[in-house]
Amino acid sequence: MSARVPPFGLLAEFPGPHELVEAAKKVRSGGYREIDAYTPYPVEELAEALHLGRSHIPKIVLAGGLVGALGGYGLEYWTSVVAYPLNVGGRPLHSWPAFIPPAFETTVLLAAFAAVFGMLALNGLPQPYHPVFNVDAFDRASRDRFFLCVESRDPRFDLEATRRFLEGLGPTRVLEVES
C-alpha cells in the first residue's frame, strides 16, 4: 500500500469578481492565511481582501537607481581623473557638469533593470509549472472564471473542514488540487 500524497490545496470556482472578493474576505476572516486568487483580469479589491501588503518594488528600484547613479558617476570620475587624466585646453579633469547626463542614463538603466528583475523575483517567475495547472477547469482562469485557492500548508487547513467552509461561501464548485 502506498500512502496518499496530501493535496496542494482546495480550489473554489466563482462566477464573478464580486463573489470572489467576498469569499476572499470571509476566508481571510476565517483564519486562513495561505490563500491565493486567480482572475482573468486585475481586480483591485482583491489585494485588500487577501491582505497582500505593500510591494517592495519601489525600494528595489530606488536601490537600483542609486547604484546606477553612483556607479555611472564613479566610472566617469575614475576614467577622467584617475586612470586616463588628459588635460585638454586647460579644462579641469573633474568636470562634473559633463558627468551628469551619462550618470542620469545609468541611473535610469539600472533602475529599469532593478524593476524588471525585482518584479520577476518577487513574483517567483518564471514559473512554468504550478499545481493548480493539474485541475482541468483551471484553464478558464485566463478567460472567464475566478478561483480562490486555500493551500494545504496553511496551519488551519483540514481537507474536509476546509471543503465544507469553502462550499458554504457559494462557489460554483470546489476542486481538490493535487500536488
Image: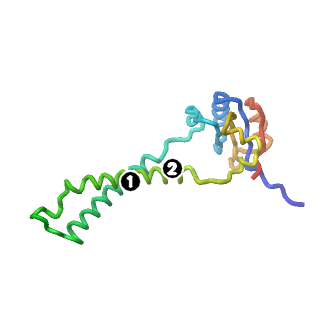
Residue beneath label 1, please? Answer: 109
Q: Amino acid at mark 1?
A: Leu
Q: Point out residue 64 in the picture as x, y percentages from the top left corner.
A: 39, 54
Q: Point out residue 99 in the picture as x, y percentages from the top left corner.
A: 23, 57
Report helix, strand or loop for mark 2.
helix
Q: Amino acid at mark 2?
A: Met
Name the colouring of the figure. rainbow
- Which residue sits at x=34%, y=53%? 107
Report how far apart the C-alphas of labels 2 and 1 lie in the structure: 15 Å
Question: Toward the viewer: 163 or 171?
Answer: 171
Disc 1: CA contacts within 10 A as few (<14), some (14-19) or many (>=20): some
The answer to whether residue 166 is above or below residue 112 is above
Residue beneath label 2, please? Answer: 119
- Which residue sits at x=24%, y=72%? 83
The answer to whether residue 146 is above or below residue 62 is above
Q: Quadrant of residue 160?
A: top right
Comparing labels 2 and 1, the label whose residue is closer to the camera? 1
- Which residue sits at x=65%, y=34%? 24
In the rendered image, which quarter contains the N terminus? bottom right
**View extreme (right): residue:** 1
Report helix, strand or loop for mark 1.
helix
Q: Point out residue 70 in the picture as x, y percentages from the top left corner.
A: 31, 58
Q: Point out residue 154 in the picture as x, y percentages from the top left corner.
A: 68, 47
The answer to whether residue 31 is above or below residue 4 is above
**View extreme (top): residue:** 18
